[in-house]
Image: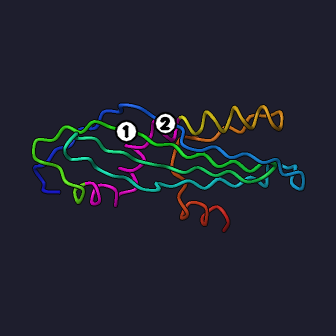
Amino acid sequence: MSNNTKIELHLVETNLIKIQFDSNEEISEFDDIKRKNSLQGFSYDKENQLLTCKITDEVTGPFNLKIVFEGVYSVTSNNDATEKDFENLFKNSEQIERICYPLLAESSLLIGTISGKSVGVPLIVRPALEDDKSDNENEE
């Protein structure tokens, strides 16, 4: 993306694409919960100026939960934005988190609701991408 290209994104809609839930009787402690999420991909429709992002959020522990959300954003740019511009933008994890925040927030809400109904205590997770680096630092 050239230095003078400015891109504004406005969320149009979020869609729950998939939800998969299983109880796990072998694990009963919340200490054993692991969360992994990531941007699964994106596509840019230049003609309609729409960016679609898909995230996956997985929780394992006393239950196994997999959620896939998709967000559709309208794109406004002072130059013609291209798919390559978005590839460059998504190389920065802070930008991914900023853009996907509405999807991450909805995922966090669902995780809390479903865990509360299934094991009696809601698991409250922050609406952020989990970074492997921070997980490794916590283990040391």
Q: Amino acid at mark 1?
A: Val
Tell whether 67 sits left or right of 5: right
Residue span colored magenta: 86-105
- Residue lying at the far front of the rendered structure: 47
For the N terminus, the image quarter is bottom left
Q: Position of residue 43 (x, y in %)?
A: 33, 52
For the C terminus, the image quarter is bottom right
Name the N-terminal-most of marks 2 and 1: 2
- Kind of element beneath mark 1: strand
Instruction: Please tell me whether residue 5 belongs to the stretch shown in magenta.
Output: no
- Kind of element beneath mark 2: strand
* Pointers 2 and 1 in contact (C-beta within 8 Å): yes
Q: Is residue 71 above or below residue 29?
A: above
Residue occupying image coordinates x 67% and y 65%: 139
User: Residue at label 2?
Assistant: 15
Residue occupying image coordinates x 37% and y 38%: 72
Q: Is residue 47 above or below residue 32?
A: above
Q: Which mark is residue 116?
A: none
Residue occupying image coordinates x 81% and y 36%: 118
Q: Amino acid at mark 2?
A: Asn
Q: Nearer the viewer, residue 92 or 39?
A: 39
Q: Which of the 4 image quadrants contains residue 102?
A: top left
Magenta region, mostly helix, strand or loop?
A: helix
